[in-house]
Image: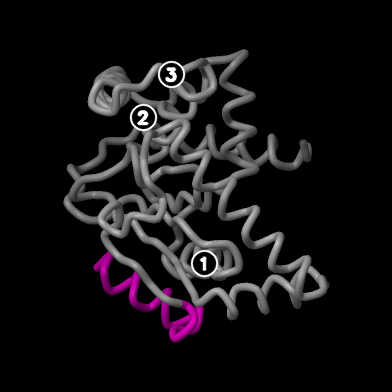
């Protein structure tokens, strides 16, 4: 994995450690946004532009996977929370596992805890990895980005320089893998609209307009 990713994690941990020592008021506003997306719906672009405009940190798949690897050998990332918040994270994970009748392995336990840790620190946009299944409540906004199949296929075809058939296969395979991941680790249906607070169609909304809608929901 790219060494710069681990450098980003080290910098993030330092920021969290500084925040841990600061007195923080109780937040009643949206402190974290989860973004789930269909392949080719430009969900990553929406997440990136949103972070640029509101000053949140972006946690995408590569960063989350690196955090899991880091946490296998060290508790420093999870210990950036104070004791009370760490107990809350443990309760969130325990309740979720019990409610969904899961038998979590080491990977899923760490994923649950890392997603919960990120949300407790706040100022975060979490892209994918089923974050919307674990995180919910008044301080969390759960967003789903969708688009018509033809629009998604065309976007993938041009962005990855593929022919039509390969773009179609890439789209179908990516969607299937993401759906299977969420079902396996969270026993959750990624395609169920009721698992989200906001569903946006980038077939009719530009990335910029989608970001503006999310910002309105946050505010």
Q: Is residue 162 magenta?
A: no
Q: Nearer the viewer, residue 60 or 96?
A: 96
Q: Is residue 203 left or right of residue 1?
A: left
**Quarter occupied by residue 135:** top left
Q: Is residue 209 magenta?
A: yes
- Residue 51, position in %: x, y? 49, 62
Mark 2 lies on residue: 21
- Which residue shows up at 25% across the image and 40% down it? 24
Magenta region, main secondary structure: helix
- Which residue shows up at 41% across the image and 26% down it? 113
**Rendered image: mark on residue 52:** 1
Which mark is nearer the camera, 3 or 1? 3
Q: Is residue 15 above or below residue 201?
A: above
The crowding category of the residue bearing disc 2, from other C-alpha atoms within 10 Å (few below 14, some 14 to 19, many at least 20), is few
Q: Is residue 23 above or below residue 105?
A: below
Mark 3 lies on residue: 104
Q: Secondary structure at mark 1?
A: helix
Which mark is nearer the camera, 3 or 2? 3
Q: Is residue 29 left or right of residue 54?
A: left
Q: Secondary structure at mark 3?
A: loop
Q: Quadrant of the N terminus?
A: top right
Question: Which of pointers 2 and 1 lies earlier in the amino acid sequence?
Answer: 2
Alpha carbon separation for disc pair 2 and 1: 26 Å
In magenta, the rendered stretch is 202-219
Q: Is residue 12 above or below residue 29?
A: above
- Residue 218, position in %: x, y? 28, 65
């Amino acid at each position: 994995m790219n060494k710069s990713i681990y450098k980003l994690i080290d910098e993030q941990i330092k920021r969290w450690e500084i925040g841990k020592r600061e007195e923080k008021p109780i937040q009643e506003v949206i402190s974290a946004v989860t973004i789930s997306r269909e392949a080719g719906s430009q969900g990553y672009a929406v997440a990136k532009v949103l972070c640029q405009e509101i000053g949140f940190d972006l946690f995408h798949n590569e960063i989350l996977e690196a955090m899991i690897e880091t946490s296998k050998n060290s508790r420093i990332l999870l210990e950036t929370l104070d004791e009370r918040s760490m107990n809350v994270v443990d309760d969130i994970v325990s309740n979720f596992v019990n409610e969904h009748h899961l038998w979590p392995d080491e990977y899923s336990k760490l994923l649950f805890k890392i997603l919960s840790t990120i949300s407790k620190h706040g100022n975060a946009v979490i892209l994918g990895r089923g974050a919307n299944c674990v995180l919910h409540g008044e301080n969390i906004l759960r967003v789903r980005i969708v688009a018509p199949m033809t629009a998604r296929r065309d976007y993938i075809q041009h962005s990855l320089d593929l022919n039509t058939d390969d773009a179609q296969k890439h789209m179908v395979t990516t969607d299937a893998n993401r759906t299977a991941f969420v079902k396996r680790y969270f026993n959750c249906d990624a395609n169920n609209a009721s698992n989200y607070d906001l569903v946006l169609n980038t077939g009719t909304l530009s990335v910029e307009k989608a970001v503006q809608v999310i910002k309105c929901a946050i505010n």
